[in-house]
Amino acid sequence: MPRNTTARIDLDALRNNYRKACARAGSAKAMAVVKADGYGHGIAQVASALADVAPKYAVACIEEAFAIRAAGLAQPVVLLQGVHAVGDLAECVHNQFEPVLHGEHQLEWMEQGSAIPEFWLKVNTGMNRLGFWPDDLPAVMAKLEKIGAFGGLQGFVSHFACADDESSAMTAAQTATFEKATAPWPSFMRSVGNSAAHFTAGQPLFDWSRPGIMLYGGSPIIGKAGPELGLEPVMTLEAPLITTRVVKAGDSVGYGAGWVAQHDTRMGMVAVGYGDGYPRHAGTDTPAAIGGRRIRLIGRVSMDMLAVDLSNTPEAREGDLVELWGRTVGVDEVASCAGTISYELLTGITRRVPRICR
């Protein structure tokens, strides 16, 4: 019989979060970002759950788009990383994928081939990862017209570097740069809004927003947790207690003897570890829960197990399920304890942990 370590996926919560994204997007439409295997929740399950409400999906790469088609879904899919080979353009035409083109080499591929899909242009407004410089856009647009690709252009996109930081002025500066760069072509659509931008007062989201982490209940804003923003947790990671014992004062627990009992302490071992994707750097005092009551981790996280202090739950027994994150303990809180972000935790859950959707 397999251990009862699972990631339970609440698809109703997912749909509720998407509706909240739409409400915050105002007149903009929201393309559901389901990259990285639906942020670790399962791309087929997530995309299918949103099929009746999301008019468009966004992924990083073409293989993720194929996974959406394999699930039997027909909505257009935006490829945020564009295409990686000239042959991908024909696949985009055939499968109704919309690549985001960000470099001169991709324009050359389109010029070489006969396949011109519907596509977007990435404008580099300060993130400095991908995209055409604003001053280069007139030449890019002239080239598109010359090669007969103008009819496939859907619009312009950019991406914010500091939208998660409410004190930063960079988002406003990037927005101004984007508006100025794209102003000569007002008939084309525009998209800039990541999850954080949905919570930025007065931030224009133009024609399409791109909610990602907020769909899964994680916070896109520094210093705030998902529930503070009205978001519902979608994943509950839980694992069973496999043993309990009392360690005497002065005894240590786990690798490196990093935690030493100050007094006799009832503790338990939980069947989850960094081999399952739970963060190794989550140390003593990271919260967990049993039956809705909060407990804490003690000592180092091992590959397959971690230790918890059961002082607050004296009735806990072998087989009881421990919530590592979910509705009692937020994933943002665990991420903070581990020195990372909820994005990494959710996408890092390994294949050893089955996803159970409801």
Image (tube, rainbow, N blue to C red):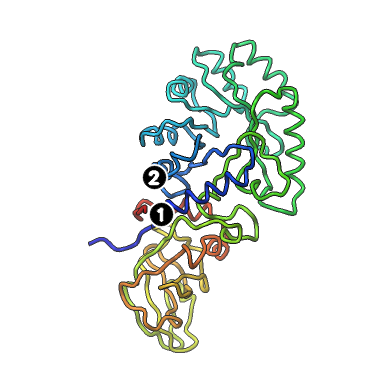
Residue 207 in percent (x, y) is at 63, 33
What residue sits 64% from the left and 10% below the top?
Answer: 146
- Type of the residue with mark 2: Gln
Give the SS element for disc 1. Answer: strand
* Quadrant of image for the N terminus: bottom left
* Quadrant of image for the C terminus: bottom left
Task: State the separation of the CA atoms marked 1 and 2.
Answer: 9 Å
- Type of the residue with mark 1: Ile
Give the SS element for disc 2. Answer: helix
Residue on which disc 1 sits? 9
Asked if the residue at tag 2 contacts the one at tag 1, i.e. Cβ–Cβ closer than 8 Å, the answer is yes
In this view, 170 is above or below 323: above
Residue on which disc 2 sits? 45
| Nearer to the camera, 323 or 229 | 229
Left or right: 126 with respect to 312?
right
In this view, 322 is above or below 122: below
What residue sits 56% from the left and 24% below the top?
Answer: 119
Residue 316 in percent (x, y) is at 36, 79
In this view, 287 is above or below 152: below
